[in-house]
Image (cartoon, coloured by chain):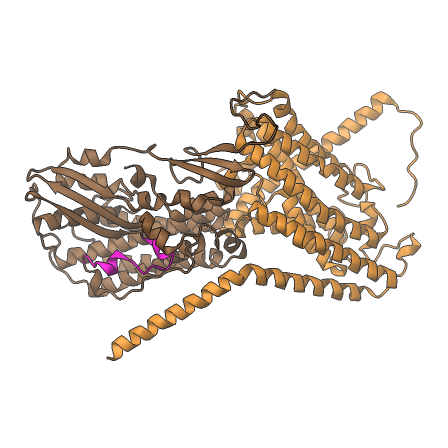
Chain colours: A brown, B orange
Amino acid sequence: MVETNVQDINADGESLEMMVNMGPQHPSTHGVFRMQLWLDGEKITRVVPHIGYLHRGSEKLCEGEQYHQIITLFDRLDYISNFNNELVFCRAVEKLMGLEVPERAEYVRVILCEMNRIASHLLFVGTFGLDIGAMTPVMLTFRGRERAQAFFEAVSGARMMHNYFRVGGIKEDLPNNFETMVREVLDLLREDAEEADRLLTYNEVFIARSKGVGVIDADTAMQYGLTGPCLRGCGVDYDVRVADPYSVYDRFDFNVPVGLDGDCWDRYYVRVQEIYQSLNIIEQALRQMSPGPIAAMGRRLIRPPKGDVYVRSENPRGEIGVYLVSDGSDKPYRVKVRPPSFCNLSALEELLKDTWVADAVVILGSLDIVLGEVDR
Amino acid sequence: MGEVVPVPDRFDLPLDIGLIALALLILFTALSVVVLSLTWLERKFLGRLQRRLGPTRTGPMGLLQPVADALKLVLKEDLIPAWADRTVFWVAPLIVIVPSFMIWVTIPAAENLVLRNLDMGLFYIVAFSVVTILGLVLAGWGSANKYGTLGGLRSAAQLISYEIPVIMVVISVAMLAQSLDLREISNFQFPGVQSDNPAEAGFTNIPYAVIMPLGLVIFLIAGLAELGRTPFDIYFAESEIVGGPFVEYSGAHWSVFFLAEYMNTFAIAALTALLFLGGWHGPFLPDWLWFLVKAYFVVLLIFWVRGTFPRLRIDQLMAFAWQVMVPLSFVNIVIVAIYLFYGWPWWVATIMSSACTLVIAYLVYKHLSRPAARVAEVYRRQQQANLRRKLEAGGT
């Protein structure tokens, strides 16, 4: 007979809750995340999330590296939206040094960041469909993401770990055919996004699975520190690009899509709408861009003045913040990151209470976490 | 048809057993070829649906891909978990595949292309196909894995629930044909064939898909659930319970489940063809080819659904079974009974049945799309407000 050391039946023969380990090796935990679920039949009664399987000590590593070397470490935090991470770190150092970034560099940064946001959201749309069991959208959106990455490669030389932004500007100027390349990619991305959108968004089964699932109201969401699409899904009109404009975001005309009920479908829909808004922003940036210098200073060792600075910006997953303390040397004294995924994940216990075990996957998917950023 | 098969008064043991074994071997080989073709077809067809090519490297158009897959599965190490109940773990795949294979004994691919035609063919098929559930539950339980247990219990709930609509539709077909013999049922759907049975004298011989579209719809949907195919692939949902009952199986034993799944898929397709689409009858082409064309058409339909829909949740699945499918299957029986009792022309049944199908489909669609319709309306208003704000800002 099967012998287990887990007691499923008490002395009176009543069945107890069953503990199930979901992860770290589970196809739908999006990395090495582990949830301990206590199940009563198919219902979740309790959940304990465990993180740290991808802990690499990034923040501590930053203390031993020179400023320009840290950019590569930031690439590896949220490895789905590398440009956005590079941007926030570069901005932190620039703010500390009081550097003025040339206009052309700002526009290039915005274009790349928005393109990266599209790539990230496309990945989300595909994997969220996969979590619910739809296998076609992921093929369409991955093709779109691959096109965006080919574009990144043409610009920066790398598909994912770009290391392209520099303190005070960007590494090199753009390729000659940049503009035509962007326009080509934009059309293709729009096509991919629309195709997946048509297939998935109003699919009846998809709605049955995600509408009204994992509902969180705006107050609770703000108490947990949710940001980005997870917060906007609850109907809160908060986007750092609008609330605290940085770079050249105040020169663009775009909407901040918000949801209604704060459920999984709204979080999904907000992201789909953001894809279209980002396409819009890139088109405007292309029109406004003009030739000029691309870096505020030459390549040299950076020694920011003594002091500390906190900078935040809008990542695809929410608000990322960097707290940087400098002791005046060529290496930072302390780098603290406020990762959006980590804060969004904190609401998981609240969201998973009394849901179905099949919904656990959907809810986790709708938070769109990246473990590289959660564990750091 | 109808003639009494004489029961042999003695078995010529070595010869008869040898013949039976040979026949079963041929059937198994044919089915294996069908399964291989199905896997290739599924990968290719899904690939085209998803704007990719599917397998291309193994042979022309990837035709040898199933062979490569089978080789890989057979050569793979067969693991057994330390805590597993060894006997149950090894027996479960057999319990799944034997019924899937056994029902093929009586499924005719043409008038005389059948291993053993039974007068009670439909009853036999329905009775045997239920045994599969036992194998799945045992597989889930025997592997001593919590995902496996969850999947096994899910499969029990799902398959038993959807067995009822399937059986009800089968009963309505039997009522129309006044027979449980698959060969007779198929023949009655073709104008050229005359029936010996006086009960059918008044009815026109046309495919039952025309007489009761409702039955066809129920049979296809419930059949999808019986097979555990998208959107009802709940008991082995890869993204939730990671394969359910099959989670601990690998290598040859897993491939047995795989084989059974595809045999069942083709069995449902073949039954749809036989019960509703007129079996092997059709103009120009030879009988067996017509049968294959119809069966493969249904199979492609199943693959198409797989490429389109996400997966339901277990409670939604059960609610759909007991609140929609079961009542509908009774409605279907009532319609058929009214039609038979009054002896009206066949198009009356068609009208009743299709009207019922359309009404129910509309209601289900309305119910499912209500939240989305609400949201779409609100977003539309939001966009209009944005646009108005922009226009006002531009005006001043």
- Residue B151 visible: yes
Choose top left, top right, bottom left or bottom right for residue A12: top right
Q: In the rendered view, would you say B378 is above or below A173?
A: below
Residue placed farthest to the front in the image?
Answer: A12
Front residue of this view, candidates A187 and B123:
B123
Question: Which stretch is magenta?
Answer: A228-247
Q: Residue at x 39, y 54 (%)?
A: A217
Q: Is residue B24 above or below residue B332?
A: above
Tell whether position B199 is magenta: no
Magenta residues: mostly which secondary structure? Answer: loop
User: Measured from the top left, where is residue A79 in percent x and y?
Assistant: 30, 42
Name the residue located 12 percent from the left edge and 38 percent from the top edge: A332
Front residue (pair A93, A266):
A266
Figure quadrant of residue B106 = top right
Image quadrant holding the N terminus of chain A, namely: top right
User: What x and y, as percent, mark residue A272?
Assistant: 39, 57
Q: Residue A372's quadrant in the figure?
A: top left
Image spot of residue B204 (x, y percent):
84, 61
Q: Is residue B89 left or right of residue A207?
A: right
**Image location of residue B257, percent across then percent down:** 61, 33
